[in-house]
Amino acid sequence: MAEPARYEELVRQFSAFGVIKRELNRLMPADCHGGSASVLTVLGRHGAMRMSKLAELLSVDLSVTSRHVAHLAERGWIERSADPADKRSRILRLTPAGQDRLDELFRRTTELLAERLDGWSEEEVGLLTELLARLRDSFGEGRAAPRPVPPAREETVRTSAST
Amino acid sequence: MAEPARYEELVRQFSAFGVIKRELNRLMPADCHGGSASVLTVLGRHGAMRMSKLAELLSVDLSVTSRHVAHLAERGWIERSADPADKRSRILRLTPAGQDRLDELFRRTTELLAERLDGWSEEEVGLLTELLARLRDSFGEGRAAPRPVPPAREETVRTSAST
DNA sequence: TATTGTTATACTCTATAACTATA
DNA sequence: TATAGTTATAGAGTATAACAATA
């Protein structure tokens, strides 16, 4: 448990979020903005899943997820198949084209980070990554279910864009 | 310089930004949303300044800053006085009411963080704060001018909500 | 002519609520 | 009746561009 002043300082630094997010967004191709990219990322990491699960992993409302998914499906980057066990559900899955898109996105962002974090050591990058994961866990509890989990369990799915 | 896989992992964790930001926004009073709050925070920390400087510190466009500032001025939380040295400029300054507002906001966010980061140690909170500051520095270069004040890093922490 | 701010416009992201179809 | 997902609507945040006043 930290002192109040610590939290206050942390909150100030949260402004970094906006800075990074805006710069990252500028990097996105016109037909695949931030929201869509998150969907691709989650599907790439966790494999096929239903809408509700995706929304949970994204920590956004189901309606928001639905729109992003529709956007991606229109472009052939993900496919929505019926769930035989529950006809209300739809199973989402990355298509090969979607996987390519995802790889391309990672390439772009990795390039940007390599440039921006030039002076950072391997350990520092890892440390920040870890702390952000914990931060997300600390917040998302109850609604989100993040946690850098091992790749998909679904058998028919190609997983992770890289590793 | 870290390996590409490190950056990729870091990018994934950036999704934490959205989670925290949305939760923080939910905490904001109806008449003072995230954008306005940032303005108050920066003015509280760095003192009076002109629009352009504020926009730079916020790392957002001047037009955006202008709107947020107008919003705050309407509510009497900041005052815009003419700059005698340059009549195009306007000097922004927190009013006592604005300071109260700011204190109140810090109280709210501190409370939330204390709750969410219950299991975090003083050192961990400090470490994350430091890394976020560095992250912002690494990104904002050229457009933003972060690196405000040396954050409290010692055991003995300043308790000033602003200055 | 360049700079400081303001305003109009457009676009993304998000949540809430109403609605359809299954369970 | 409850749940999965879609769609309509509204609100916040941001950037670009056109404009005013001053340097």
Image: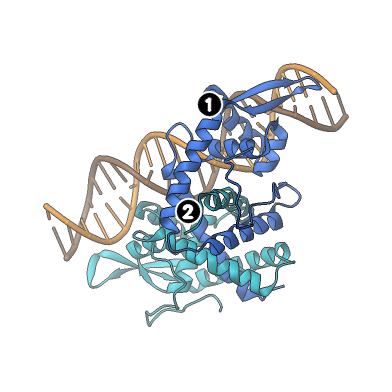
Chain colours: A cyan, B blue, C brown, D orange
Percent position (x, y) of residue A59? 41, 58
The residue that appears at 47% across and 78% down in the rendered structure is: A159
Q: Nearer the viewer, residue A33 or A12?
A: A12
What's the mark number on residue A6? none
In the image, taking residue A54 as reference, residue B68 lies left or right, namely right
- Taking the image as drawn, is residue B71 in sight? no
Q: Which tag, 1 or 2, sits closer to the chain's start?
A: 2
**Is disc 2 placed on a helix, strand or loop?**
helix
Q: Is residue B129 among the parts visible in the rendering? A: yes
The residue to which callout 2 is attached is B20
Tag count: 2
Disc 1: host chain: B
Q: Badge 1: how crowded within 10 Å, few (<14), some, or many (20+)?
A: few
Which of these two is toward me, A5 or B155?
Answer: B155
Residue B52 picture quarter = top right
Labelled pair 1, 2 in contact (Cβ < 8 Å): no
Q: Amino acid at mark 1?
A: Ala
Q: Is residue A52 left or right of residue B68?
A: left
| Residue type for callout 2 | Ile
- Residue B15, percent from left and from top: 51, 60
**Disc 1 target residue:** B97
Using the image, name the chain to which the residue with label 2 belongs: B
